[in-house]
Image: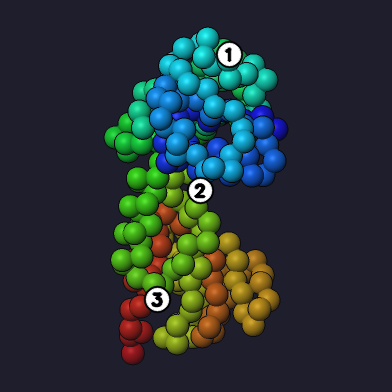
């Protein structure tokens, strides 16, 4: 497949090399030629120096034949405009943008663009780890607004039901695993120590579940 990467900073250089290493054709474009020094020395894809908002430069990259484009500069407006051009003018089938500043996320949402915000995502992951080790993230959707968590059932929840744990929290139970065997459980399932519960939840939802799991059982 043929991919275009717009912006050759640290993110763009790493993405370009990863795509190249997987055997894809890659063209990375940046308006500052010195930025190509960020590329891994083993990279043998194309580099295009020029104004990333110029249609002539975009055509020079081969955008009309691109299977996908990633706009990953450190400017959210530039990323949004390039991505919109790629999708609306050149019919690039798969377009992804980098959300550099979380305050600009609404701009990408307005254009209905797939966006990845490393700043917001990283802050949420660090916040999560600071709170508690209970609730390991196994899958993240979007920019981390909804994730799948793995929760370990402690001794104080033995004999209580899954419904008692999950009801009222912003979560959906995905699976229950006991002795290595996974199943789709119902709310009436009675828990045992060491059970693993996988739930899809918001940050508020998983915090509520953590509080319930850690709370002492009333006599």
Q: CA distance from mark 3 to mark 2?
A: 24 Å
Residue at (62, 36) in percent of width and height: 44
In terms of secondary structure, where does tag 1 sit?
helix
**Looking at the picture, does residue 154 appear above or below residue 107?**
below
Residue at (59, 28) in percent of width and height: 46
Q: CA distance from mark 3 to mark 1?
A: 56 Å
Nearer the camera: disc 3 or disc 1: 1
Seen from the viewer's position, the closer of residues 145 and 133 is 133
Q: Position of residue 167 (x, y in %)?
A: 45, 64
Seen from the viewer's position, the closer of residues 105 and 182 is 105
Q: Is residue 103 left or right of residue 172?
A: left
Q: Is residue 152 left or right of residue 214?
A: right
First in sequence: mark 1 vs mark 2: 1
How is this picture coloured? rainbow
First in sequence: mark 3 vs mark 1: 1
Q: Position of residue 126 (x, y in %)?
A: 34, 59
Write down the residue under mark 1: 59
First in sequence: mark 3 vs mark 2: 2
Picture quadrant of residue 165: bottom left
Write down the residue under mark 3: 213
Residue at (48, 71) in percent of width and height: 151
Seen from the viewer's position, the closer of residues 61 and 140 is 61
**The furthest residue to the top:** 56
Q: Position of residue 118 (x, y in %)?
A: 40, 45
Write down the residue under mark 2: 141
**Looking at the picture, does residue 150 appear above or below residue 148?**
below
In the rendered view of the protein, which quadrant contains the C terminus?
bottom left
**The furthest residue to the bottom:** 219
In terms of secondary structure, where does tag 2 sit?
strand
User: Can residue 166 be seen here?
Assistant: yes
Picture quadrant of residue 63: top right
């Amino acid at each position: 497949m043929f991919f275009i990467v717009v912006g050759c900073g640290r993110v763009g250089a790493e993405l370009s090399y990863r795509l190249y290493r997987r055997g894809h054709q890659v063209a990375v474009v940046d308006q500052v030629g010195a930025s190509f020094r960020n590329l891994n020395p083993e990279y043998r894809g194309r580099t295009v120096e020029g104004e990333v908002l110029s249609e002539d430069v975009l055509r020079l990259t081969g955008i009309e034949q691109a299977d996908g484009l990633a706009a990953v500069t450190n400017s959210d407006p530039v990323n949004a405009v390039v991505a919109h051009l790629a999708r609306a003018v050149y019919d690039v089938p798969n377009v992804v943008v980098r959300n550099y500043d979380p305050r600009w996320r609404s701009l990408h949402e307005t254009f209905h663009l797939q966006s990845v915000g490393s700043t917001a995502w990283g802050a949420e992951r660090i916040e999560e780890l600071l709170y508690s080790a209970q609730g390991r993230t196994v899958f993240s959707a979007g920019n981390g607004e909804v994730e799948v968590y793995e929760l370990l059932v402690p001794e104080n929840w033995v004999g209580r039901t899954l419904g008692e744990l999950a009801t009222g929290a912003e979560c959906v139970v995905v699976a229950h695993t006991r002795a290595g065997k996974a199943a789709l459980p119902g709310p009436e399932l009675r828990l045992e120590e060491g059970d693993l519960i996988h739930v899809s939840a918001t940050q508020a939802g998983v915090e509520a579940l953590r509080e319930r799991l850690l709370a002492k059982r009333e006599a």
